[in-house]
Image (cartoon, helix red, strand yellow):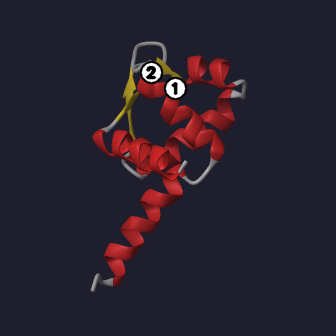
Amino acid sequence: MKNKLEYRKLERIVKGFANHRRLQILELLKRQPELSIQEVAEQVKSDEKNVSSHVNKMAISGLVIKRNDIRSVRLKLTKRGSIILKFVRMLE
């Protein structure tokens, strides 16, 4: 049986994708890696502050990697993020 810390780690991962907007962002990054937060906000029709908040939760969960560019923050899906997308598609 898993210990309490392992369950909390799993909970953090689930919280990282337990939102329709976050799932939308993950799908977008799968198709178009290295988008900026501004580009993601434009494509999902949301404001940058909201997208940034979602991205932070996904980064904490290990679903995306944030990389500072000269003018923006670029986003990339991690291996875990790709696995989560496959998992979610299986639930459909």
- Residue at 44%, 18% in the rendered image: 32
Residue 59 position, x and y percent, is: 43, 44
Which picture quadrant has residue 75?
top left
Residue 40 position, x and y percent, is: 58, 23
Q: Nearer the viewer, residue 29 or 56?
A: 29
Real-space Cα distance between discs 1 and 2?
5 Å
SS for dot 2: helix
Side of 4 where 1 appears, left or right: left
Q: Is residue 79 above or below residue 32?
A: below
Q: Is residue 13 above or below residue 24?
A: below
Residue 61 position, x and y percent, is: 41, 52
Which picture quadrant has residue 21?
top right
Q: Is residue 60 above or below residue 82?
A: below
Residue 13 position, x and y percent, is: 43, 58
Q: How many marks?
A: 2
**Mark 2 crowdedness (10 Å alpha carbons): few <14, some 14-19, many ≥20:** few
The residue that label 1 is drawn on is: 28
Residue type, numbered disc 2:
Arg
Residue type, numbered disc 1:
Leu
The residue that label 2 is drawn on is: 31
**The furthest residue to the top:** 71
- Please state, as top left, top right, bottom left or bottom right, where the N terminus lies in the image: bottom left
